Image (tube, grey):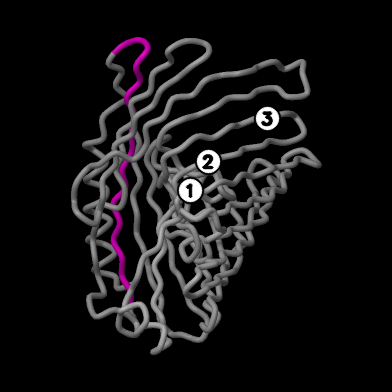
Amino acid sequence: MRKPFTILLTLMLLTVTSFVPAEVTAADDLVISGFFDVIGTYSNGNADATNFALNQAEISFFRQFSEKSTGQVVTAYNSNNGNFQLAAAEVSINLHKSNEDFVTSAAVYGGMFDVPFGIDYQVNPSPMRRLADTPLVVFQTHGSWVDFGFRFNAESESGNLVVFWVNGFASSFSTTDTALALSLGVTVGEEMNTTPANAIGGRLGVTPAENFEVGGSWAIGINASGGNEMSLFGADFQYELNDRLSFKGEYINHLHNRSIEEAEHNGYYLQSLYSFDKMFLVGRYGSVKGEGEEINNRFTAGVGWIIEESVEIRFASSFYKDSNDNTNILQIVAGF
């Protein structure tokens, strides 16, 4: 990254932190919180190499109705149109809670939420994602899957289980077959969208040892005729070696069983994080391959400084195998 760009963006982002308010509560049982992050991106592979943007901004309203139920509404900034819109709205009902039983807790949720496939959804908010970009395989498969529906969660000392039933996410594709394109009334390469009528799935996590979890995820998209139009399968692990060093990774396979044309993506990523008192280092290697496409490999390394408990400055560089292109991101994250 060029030095003048780094100095200018650092000064801009440090100035932003002075406007972050403290946590606000509108009432004793209503909690208002949120976060935002600003990024500056320099990519030597783009004509418009330098870009500044508000990446994420969210405001959350949470209320504990009783010991049995809670409610939450989240509004988020959409960087594509520059507007705030609904990002989550859900009610939870506590079905069971006891530390003495094998199943220590169980609850049902209904509304709009991050669909719990795999483990990457756990770091969708930028304060929790220590690298600004999403792993390649996640981006190429289900992405940041937010949907309407219901889910059931259960936990024990041995692991956890979640099952969901939602609308299902849209996918786009383009055909390279001239005859098929003609029969569909589209041109070769024209983008088309398909959306399953519903999607069901879940994840089972097992903790064979302390601070170590392995999991398996699945999801099936069902079309209006009752057929299986989409399938997602994944395996993941998370391991905290100690208070400073942790590892995680995922493998994901995504198959579209379209009646007109099939498409498949699969890949994985591995990530490690090392934390100091006021600093952290993070690295990720990821690979993804689509049907009929070349393998795409990316390595990302980052460093972060914890200015205060809710304010961090981060810098990361991404490098692609068999390419001289690289992307550099300077980011500030603030919570309130």
Q: Residue 259 placed where, x, y %?
A: 50, 70
Q: CA distance from mark 1 to mark 3?
A: 26 Å
Q: Residues within 10 Å of mark 1 (few under 14, many from 20)?
A: some
Disc 1 residue type (three-letter)? Asn
In the depicted structure, whether residue 151 falls above or below residue 241: above
Please give the residue where the numbered disc 2 appears in the rendered image.
165
Where does the image place residue 269, in percent across and percent down from the top left? 59, 63
Callout 1: SS: strand
Q: Which residues are magenta?
A: 27-43
Quadrant of the rendering where the C terminus is positioned: top left
Q: Amino acid at mark 3?
A: Glu
Q: Measuring 43% from the left and 87% from the top, which residue is drawn there?
A: 177
Mark pair 2, 1: CA separation: 7 Å
Q: How many marks?
A: 3
- Residue 29, magenta (yes or no): yes
Residue at 48% from the left image edge and 17% from the top image edge: 69
Q: Which residue in the structure is indicated by mark 1?
A: 198
Q: Which residue is mark 3?
A: 155
